C-alpha cells in the first residue's frame, strides 16, 4: 500500500506499519486504558451534575441500566469481563446453536401465522405466502380459526410434505392432529416423511385460560405417534403467555423451561425414552425490539435446556433445543402501526442472530385486527430480505465472542435459572399457575414496567414519544382469534397511552393546552417541544404562544387560543423572574390549571412536567380537568 505522504510542514511522519499492507491508524494516538476512559467519563458526568463529590463508586456505574431481570447492563465491556465458555455450535452447552452448521445452508424457517374462520380465504392467503417465500405455515384451527372439519379444504394445493404445517388448535389439538394426519394419508405421504407440528400445549392453555388442562392426553398422543412419525413435533412449549403477561425475559425463560420439564416427565411416563421425549418438543419465545436481550435470550434458552437434558440423562445429540421465535405481540401498537414494521425488523434480526430455527414476523397491523394481504406481504418480506439480501444466515452465531453479548447471555441464564428453580420449588409449572405464584411474579414485573412506560423511560415511538395527532386510523376486521379471559392477562405496552388517545379523539373538538412560551424562541424551544410531545401522547393539541416579551403578551395569547389549561415553557432563569407572575395572570384570565415544563416550586403553578415525570398521570389529570371522560 502506498505510504501516506506528509502534507504539512510540521506534521509528524506516520509510523511504519507493523506488517506490509497494514496501516497503523492509531500509531499517533496515546494508548488508551480503562482508567483513562474512566477519567473522561467522570469529567462528563461532573459537568452534567450526575456525579456528586461524595460519590465513592466507579463513575461509569452511573451509566448502568438495570434490567427487569435484576441485573445491570454496563456501558462498557472488555476482555477483562469474562463469561462462561460458550462452546461451539452444535455442541454442549449449545449457546452458539443447536446444530454444527447453523443456518448457513438452509436459512431459518420462515413461518407465518394464519387465522380466520373461512377456509377458502385462509387457503388463498397461505398460497400467497408460500409463493412469496414462506417456508412453513402456522395455522389456527378450532376456536378462532378454521374448523377442524375444514382443515383439508384450507390446505388444498399446499404441498404439506414440503411446507410444514404447525397447528395452533387450543383444546382441540387431538381432533386437529387427526384431521391433519388424515390429509397426509389421503395424499399417500409416508409417515416417515411427515413434517410439521401438532401444537399440543395443555400447559399453555392453562396459562391462557386459568382452567386445568391435563397433560397426559397430549403425552399419550405423542407416544402413539412416536414410532411412526419421527419428524413430527407433537408438543410446543410456549413462552408467549408469560411474555404477554408483562413478564421479563428471565421469567419467560424460567416458565418455559419449567413447562418443558413437565412435558419431559409426562412423555417419559407415557412410555417414551428420555431422548425421544426431548425430541418431541419445540419451544416458542418472543423476540422483541430490544435486540441484544433477544439475542441473549435465545442463546441462554439453549444453555438452560442443555443443562436440564444433561441431568435428565438425554444423549448429547438430543440435547439441542428447537426454537420458534415470534415477534412480540406486547410491543405492537395500534397507534402509528407503521412503526411496527421497524419493530418487527429489529426483532427478526435479533432472532436470526440469536439462532432461532423458525421465525414468525407478525404483520404490522396484528394489534388492530385481522391482517390484510399487504401487511402479510411486508411481514414475510422482512424475513426474506434479512436472509436473502442481508445474508444474516451466512454466519453462525455472529454475536458470539462479543464481551457484551456473552456476559448478557450468562447473566440472563443465571436469572432465568433462578426463576425456573423457584417454580420447581413451588410445585412445578402447573401448581405455580394454579396457586397464583407465577401470576404474582409476572404482575410485579408488569407493574414495574408499567411505571417506566408511564414515565416514558421505556419509550414507545409513535405513542408515548413523537405521536402523530393527524394520523388516519388504520382499520381492520376484528380478529377471530380467541383471547379468553381467566388466565394470565395479555398486555400491550402501549395500551394505557392509546386509551387516552381514544378518549381525546372521541371529543367533538380536540382538547388543547396553551404553551405559555417565555422570551425569545431560542430560549423556550426545547421545553416547548418537550411539552408538546408529552401532551400529544394523550391526544392533546398544543397551541404555541410564540416569542413573547411580557406577561401581557402571554395572557393575550392564552385568551385568544381558546384553551383552558396553560403550560409555562422557558429557561430556569426566566422561571425565577416570571413564573409566579405569569401563572397568577393566566389564572386571573381564566386558566383552570397552570403547569410548568421543568422543575421548581413557583407560586400559582399547579404541577411540573419534566423528563421522567409520570406523564400518564399528568395526561389523565389534564383530560379530566378538560371534562374528557
Image (spheres, rainbow, N blue to C red):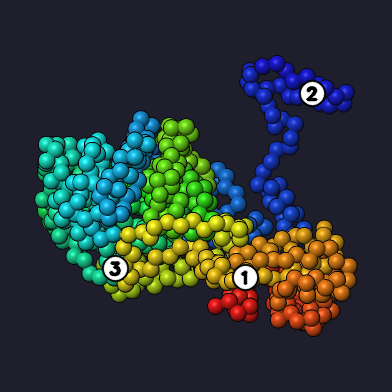
Q: Residue at x 38, y 32 (%)?
A: 104
The crowd level at tag 2 (other Cα within 10 Å; few <14, some 14-19, many 20+) is few
- 11 in relation to 620, above or below: above
The x and y percentages for residue 592 are: 71, 81
The answer to which of 491 and 443 lies nearer the viewer is 491
Which label number is shown at residue 509? Answer: 1
How many marks on residues? Answer: 3
Which label number is shown at residue 277? Answer: none
The crowd level at tag 3 (other Cα within 10 Å; few <14, some 14-19, many 20+) is some
Identify the secondary structure beneath mark 1.
Answer: loop
The crowd level at tag 1 (other Cα within 10 Å; few <14, some 14-19, many 20+) is few
Front: mark 2 or 3: 3
Give the CA distance from mark 2 to mark 3.
Answer: 73 Å
Q: Residue at x 57, y 56 (%)?
A: 471
The x and y percentages for residue 510 are: 62, 69
Q: Which residue is mark 3?
A: 209
Give the CA distance from mark 3 to mark 1.
Answer: 41 Å
Res 580 quadrant in image: bottom right
- 258 in relation to 394, above or below: below
First in residue order: circle 2 vs circle 3: 2
Identify the secondary structure beneath mark 2.
Answer: loop
Amino acid at each position: 500500500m502506498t505510504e501516506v505522504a506528509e502534507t504539512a510542514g510540521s506534521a509528524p511522519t506516520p509510523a511504519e506499519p507493523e506488517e506490509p499492507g497494514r496501516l497503523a491508524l492509531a500509531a499517533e494516538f496515546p494508548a488508551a486504558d480503562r482508567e483513562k476512559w474512566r477519567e473522561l467519563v467522570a469529567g462528563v458526568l461532573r459537568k452534567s451534575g450526575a456525579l456528586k463529590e461524595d460519590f465513592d463508586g466507579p463513575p461509569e456505574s452511573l451509566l448502568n441500566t438495570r434490567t427487569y431481570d435484576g441485573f445491570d447492563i454496563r456501558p462498557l465491556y472488555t476482555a477483562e469481563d469474562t463469561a462462561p465458555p460458550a462452546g461451539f455450535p452444535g455442541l454442549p452447552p449449545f449457546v452458539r446453536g443447536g446444530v454444527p452448521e447453523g443456518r448457513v445452508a438452509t436459512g431459518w424457517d420462515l413461518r407465518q401465522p394464519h387465522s380466520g374462520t373461512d377456509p377458502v380465504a385462509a387457503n388463498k392467503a397461505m398460497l400467497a405466502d408460500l409463493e412469496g417465500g414462506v417456508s412453513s405455515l402456522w395455522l389456527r384451527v378450532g376456536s378462532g380459526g378454521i374448523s377442524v372439519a375444514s382443515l383439508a379444504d384450507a390446505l388444498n394445493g399446499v404441498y404439506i410434505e414440503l411446507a410444514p404445517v404447525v397447528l395452533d388448535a387450543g383444546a382441540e389439538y387431538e381432533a386437529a392432529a387427526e384431521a391433519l394426519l388424515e390429509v397426509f394419508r389421503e395424499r399417500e405421504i409416508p409417515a416417515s416423511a411427515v413434517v410439521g407440528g401438532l401444537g399440543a400445549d395443555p400447559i399453555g392453555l392453562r396459562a391462557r385460560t386459568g382452567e386445568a388442562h391435563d397433560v397426559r392426553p397430549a403425552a399419550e398422543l405423542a407416544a402413539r405417534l412416536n414410532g411412526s412419525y419421527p419428524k413430527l413435533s407433537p408438543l410446543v412449549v410456549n413462552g408467549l403467555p408469560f411474555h404477554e403477561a408483562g413478564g421479563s425475559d428471565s421469567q419467560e425463560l424460567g416458565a418455559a423451561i419449567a413447562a418443558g420439564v413437565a412435558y419431559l416427565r409426562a412423555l417419559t411416563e407415557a412410555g417414551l425414552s428420555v431422548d425421544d421425549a426431548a425430541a418431541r418438543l419445540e419451544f416458542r419465545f418472543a423476540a422483541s425490539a430490544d435486540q441484544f436481550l433477544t439475542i441473549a435470550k435465545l442463546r441462554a434458552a439453549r444453555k438452560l435446556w442443555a443443562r436440564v437434558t444433561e441431568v435428565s440423562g438425554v444423549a448429547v445429540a438430543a440435547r439441542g433445543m428447537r426454537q420458534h421465535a415470534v415477534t412480540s405481540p406486547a410491543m405492537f401498537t395500534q397507534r402509528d402501526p407503521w412503526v411496527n414494521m421497524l419493530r418487527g425488523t429489529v426483532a427478526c434480526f435479533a432472532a436470526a442472530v440469536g439462532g432461532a430455527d423458525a421465525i414468525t414476523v407478525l404483520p404490522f397491523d396484528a394489534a388492530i385486527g385481522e391482517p390484510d394481504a399487504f401487511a402479510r406481504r411486508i411481514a414475510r418480506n422482512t424475513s426474506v430480505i434479512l436472509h436473502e439480501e442481508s445474508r444474516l444466515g451466512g454466519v453462525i452465531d455472529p454475536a458470539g465472542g462479543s464481551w457484551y453479548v456473552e456476559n448478557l447471555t450468562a447473566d440472563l441464564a443465571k436469572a432465568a435459572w433462578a426463576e425456573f428453580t423457584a417454580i420447581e420449588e413451588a410445585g412445578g409449572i402447573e401448581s405455580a399457575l394454579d396457586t397464583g405464584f407465577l401470576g404474582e411474579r409476572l404482575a410485579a414485573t408488569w407493574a414495574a414496567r408499567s411505571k417506566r412506560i408511564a414515565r416514558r423511560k421505556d419509550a414507545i415511538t409513535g405513542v408515548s414519544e413523537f405521536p402523530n395527532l393527524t394520523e388516519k386510523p388504520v382499520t381492520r376486521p376484528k380478529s377471530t382469534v380467541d383471547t379468553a379471559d381467566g388466565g394470565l392477562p395479555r398486555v400491550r405496552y402501549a395500551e394505557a397511552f392509546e386509551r387516552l388517545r381514544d378518549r381525546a379523539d372521541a371529543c367533538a373538538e380536540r382538547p388543547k393546552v396553551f404553551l405559555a412560551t417565555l422570551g425569545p424562541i431560542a430560549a423556550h424551544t426545547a421545553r416547548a417541544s418537550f411539552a408538546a410531545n408529552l401532551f400529544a401522547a394523550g391526544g392533546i393539541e398544543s397551541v404555541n404562544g410564540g416569542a413573547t416579551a411580557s406577561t401581557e403578551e402571554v395572557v393575550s395569547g392564552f385568551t385568544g387560543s381558546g384553551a383552558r389549561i396553560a403550560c409555562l415553557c422557558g429557561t430556569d432563569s426566566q422561571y425565577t423572574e416570571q413564573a409566579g407572575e405569569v401563572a397568577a395572570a393566566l389564572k386571573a384570565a381564566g386558566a383552570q390549571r397552570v403547569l410548568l415544563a421543568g422543575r421548581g416550586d413557583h407560586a400559582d403553578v399547579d404541577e411540573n412536567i419534566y423528563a421522567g415525570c409520570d406523564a400518564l398521570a399528568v395526561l389523565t389529570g389534564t383530560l379530566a380537568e378538560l371534562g374528557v371522560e
